[in-house]
Amino acid sequence: MIKFEELEAKSIEKGLIPVIIQDNKSLRVLMLGYMNREAYEKSIAEGRVTFFSRSKERLWTKGETSGNYLYIKEIEKDCDNDTLLLRVDPAGPVCHTGSTSCFGGENSEGFIRELSQIIKTRHEEMPEGSYTTKLFNKGVNKIAQKVGEEAVESVIEATNGTRDGLIYELSDLVYHVLVLMENNGVTVSDIEKELWSRHYLPKR
């Protein structure tokens, strides 16, 4: 666990550290706040985010009025030890306007990771009547067959169809690929690491 004294508070008069809040599933940036030592220690103790409000001049637990708490999943500090990144599970909209994020309003950016988590939950719980459950019950051969079918349909739409049609078919393809990944124990992070290594690591 990171200790507050390891950090370099930039706002000298209050000893404040900027804190970036990021959705643990979608990785979307949700908001920016500030913590002093007391706010940080309260956040650690309770497992949910408390800031130091510069306007209220007091500790402020996000969600204390709305109930939309930010439950902490992971904490990282940056390379200069002067900023924190908190990955959280939000209990509801983060922005006071009712939007999911304070940046950019409502959109579906980052939903692929969230969908991956939904599929993982389906695999764990196997609810009756779920199409995803039916795929898992049929096994890897059927799932792989569906990936192949959706890939062919995407190719056909790309060469002879419309942009909207291609988006529809590619969405089917991505969904079934995610089901195949979950079935075989492969995560989105595994794919990201492989692609990262291809791009950044020196070729032998």
Image: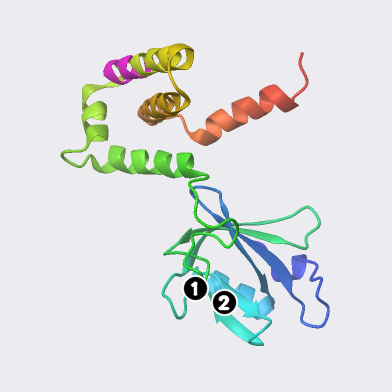
- Residue 26 percent coordinates (x, y): 50, 47
Classed neighbour count for the residue bearing mark 1: other residues with Cα under 10 Å, few (<14), some (14–19), many (≥20): few
- Residue 197 percent coordinates (x, y): 68, 26
Amino acid under label 2?
Answer: Lys
Which range of residues does the magenta coloring cover? 141-147
Q: Is residue 30 left or right of residue 112?
A: right
Q: Looking at the rendering, in which quadrant would you find the N terminus?
A: bottom right
Real-space CA distance between mark 1 and mark 2, rounded to the nearest whole angstrom: 6 Å
Q: How is the image coloured?
A: rainbow
Q: Residue furthest left?
A: 128
Looking at the image, is 29 positioned above or below residue 71? above
Q: Compare residues 133 and 96 and report the one nearer the observer.
A: 96
Identified at 66% across, 65% down, the residue is 19
Dots 1, 2 in contact, CB < 8 A: yes
The answer to if 142 sits in the magenta stretch is yes
Residue 42: numbered disc: 2
Q: Secondary structure at mark 2?
A: helix
Amino acid under label 1?
Answer: Glu
Residue 111: numbered disc: none
Classed neighbour count for the residue bearing mark 2: other residues with Cα under 10 Å, few (<14), some (14–19), many (≥20): some
Identified at 44% across, 45% down, the residue is 114
Looking at the image, is 186 positioned above or below residue 65? above
* Residue of label 1: 46
